[in-house]
Amino acid sequence: MTKDTRFSNWQPCKTPGETNLVGVSSCLEPYSDADHLTGLFEAVAGPGNDDIWQYMPLGPFENSEAFAQALAYTRQHIGWKTMVIKCTATQTIRGMASYMRLRPEHGSVEVGCIAFGKKLKRTFAATEAMFLMMCHVFDDLGYRRYEWKCNNANDASKNAAVRFGFVFEGVFRNDMIVHGASRDTAWYSITDDEWPAVKAMFQAWLKPENFDQHGNQLQKLSTFKVSEY
C-alpha cells in the first residue's frame, strides 16, 4: 500500500473571523460591543425577533445587556468568531454569523449561529455573505472542511445547507439538550475538493445578469449546482 504523504508537512491554518470581508451588497466585520451591539440587537434580537432563536442554543434575549453577555460568553469560553453582516452601501447592520468549532490544526471550521434580520432574509446580500465567509475559509486560509450543523427539526436550515452546496453527512441522535428539549443534530459539510464547484455555482448566481432591474433573481442558485463534484 502506497503511503499518503500529502499531509506530512501539514501546518495549522490561521484562525478565521479576524478580518473584514467585503462584497458588492454585503460586508462582514468581526463583532465588537462598541461598534455593533446596539445595531445588531435591533436587527436580530430586539422585539419581534424571538423566532430567529427558536432552534439556537442561545436566546431569545430580553435586552441588549443579556445579548452582550451571551456574545461575550461564546467568544471568551467557546471560541466563536462572530461576524456582523452589514449592507455595503449604507453600512446598516442586518445580521450575524459565527465561525465555530474551530480546529485549525485539522483545517476544519463550522459556520453557525446564523441570524438574519428581516431586511436580510431571502436577499442577494444574505447569499453573498455566506459566500464571502466560505471564500475566506477556503481561498484565504486554506481550510479543508467547512461544516454546517442544525437542529434536525429545523427544515429551513437544512434546506439552506443544501442550497448553499453543503453535503448531508448524517444525524447525531440525542446530541444536545436545548431550551429544555432533546435535539438531534443534522451534519453537513463542504470539503476543499468540492469547493471549486461550489464556488463556481455561487459566482454564476451572483452575476449581475442573473437579476432583473428590480433585483429579482432570474435563476435560482440550485440551477447552477453541479450534481457531482
Image: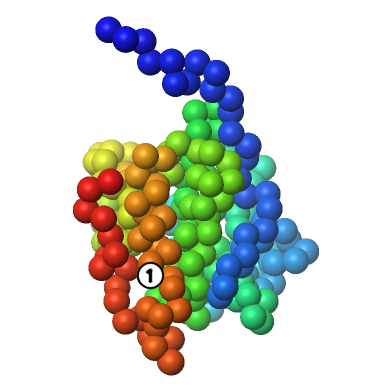
Q: In the rendered view, does 83 fall on the left or right side of 146? A: right
Q: In the rendered view, does 123 fall on the left or right side of 164? A: right
Q: Amino acid at mark 1?
A: Trp
Label 1 packing within 10 angstroms: few (<14), some (14-19), many (20+): many
Under circle 1, the secondary element is: helix
Q: Which residue is mark 1?
A: 205
| Depth check, front residue: 87 or 11 | 11
- Residue in the image at 50% along x and 73% along y: 125
Image location of residue 46, percent across then percent down: 57, 75
- Residue in the image at 41% along x and 40% along y: 192
- Residue in the image at 38% along x and 15% along y: 4
Q: Residue furthest right?
A: 34
- Residue in the image at 58% along x and 68% along y: 23
Quadrant (top left, top right, bottom left, bottom right) of the N terminus:
top left
Q: Is residue 182 shown to the viewer in this render?
A: no
| Depth check, front residue: 124 or 33 | 124
| Depth check, front residue: 101 or 189 | 189
Q: Quadrant of residue 32?
A: bottom right
Q: In the rendered view, does 108 fall on the left or right side of 225? A: right
